Amino acid sequence: MIDTSSASASLKLPTFADVEAARERISGAAHRTPVLTSRTADAMAEASLFFKAENLQRAGAFKFRGAYNAVAALDEFSRRNGVVAFSSGNHAQALADAARLQGVPATIVMPKDAPEIKIAATKAYGAEIHFYDRYTEDREAISRRLAAERSATLVPPFDHPDVIAGQGTAALELIEEVGELDLIVVPLGGGGLLAGSALSARALSPACRIIGVEPEAGNDGQQSLRKGEVVRIPAPKSIADGAIVTHVGDHNFAILKHTVHDIVTVTDAQLVETMRFFAERMKIIVEPTGCLAAAAVLQGVLRCAGARVGILLSGGNVDLKTFNELLSAR
């Protein structure tokens, strides 16, 4: 049971029942992604590793789960007026695709330096894009203004109960498929995937330790967990573009502070080595952000010898030019 007595009374926190409801909403739209294993990876970690391959999810990342669930939960009035979101790319693509599938107009606020592959995909899904400078402009303020002007619904990338519940379905599927775990390791940006995973892990594998992983340059989540309150930082610079946030969400942190055992960090160099491992040994493409959790295990940041470990690979949206440049640099 999650103690939410100290959470703000204005927050409506999702529960595992909401995760189960989300599974029903997204069924038939989201892919049930495979769980991959590797004897080489097991030997490196001296553990049994189970990789939930959300890089193979629709729109290339776990974000489709939460986006589709949030759009599906809208009433008819809200569906007609559309949705607005802010995102560096994966939530942008996911919401654009989810809205298109459900006949809902979508407007996405994206940083000018977002990966070209993510911009192109978001446009291809039919969304209208507004660009901003992530280092000088406030994306949340821009999005709130657009939503107010259009009477649209703001669907943030992580700080939203329906988004959190949708993201939790990935860990739900993982644990249902492989059984109880000793440890589940999850990428951390704004906290949607980690919070949702925590809801599922607590319900289905209560003895499991829950660990978040974020880029070393942007350890706001780690600082927040240590301090017991949300810590805000300047926009970090990292190749893990999906985790470039200034703070975790309020809904997310209200869950994380009672469920997550620790938050660790990895370097960009460790992310590149993990990308290389997946490409060379497991023949899959995982974007830098998607490698966060795996890097912590495979690069020795987390010691998990003898354990059964679930690892969320959160996405695979990296353009081939960037992918090649990162793996070619030594």
Image (cartoon, rainbow, N blue to C red):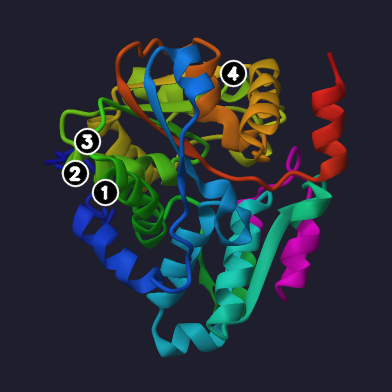
Q: Which mark is residue 180?
A: 3
Question: Which residue shows up at 32% across the image and 64% down it?
Answer: 23
Q: Closer to the camera: disc 1 or disc 4?
A: 1
Residue that mark 2 sits on: 204
CB-based contact (under 8 Å), mark 1 and mark 2: yes
Mark 1 or mark 4, earlier in chain: 1
Q: Which mark is residue 176?
A: 1
Q: Is residue 139 magenta?
A: yes
Amino acid type shown at disc 2: Leu
Position of the C terminus, as image quadrant, is: top right
- Judging depth in this view, the residue of 72 and 59 nearest the camera is 59
Q: Which mark is residue 127?
A: none
Residue that mark 4 sits on: 216
CB-based contact (under 8 Å), mark 3 and mark 2: yes
Question: Which residue shows up at 17% across the image and 44% down it?
Answer: 203
C-alpha distance separating marks 3 and 1: 8 Å
Q: Secondary structure at mark 1?
A: helix
Mark 3 or mark 2, earlier in chain: 3
Span shown in magenta:
119-142
C-alpha distance separating marks 1 and 2: 8 Å
Q: Left or right? Give the position of 255 relative to 150.
A: left
In terms of image quadrants, where is residue 18?
bottom left
Amino acid type shown at disc 4: Glu
Amino acid type shown at disc 1: Glu
Mark 1 or mark 2, earlier in chain: 1
Q: Secondary structure at mark 4?
A: helix
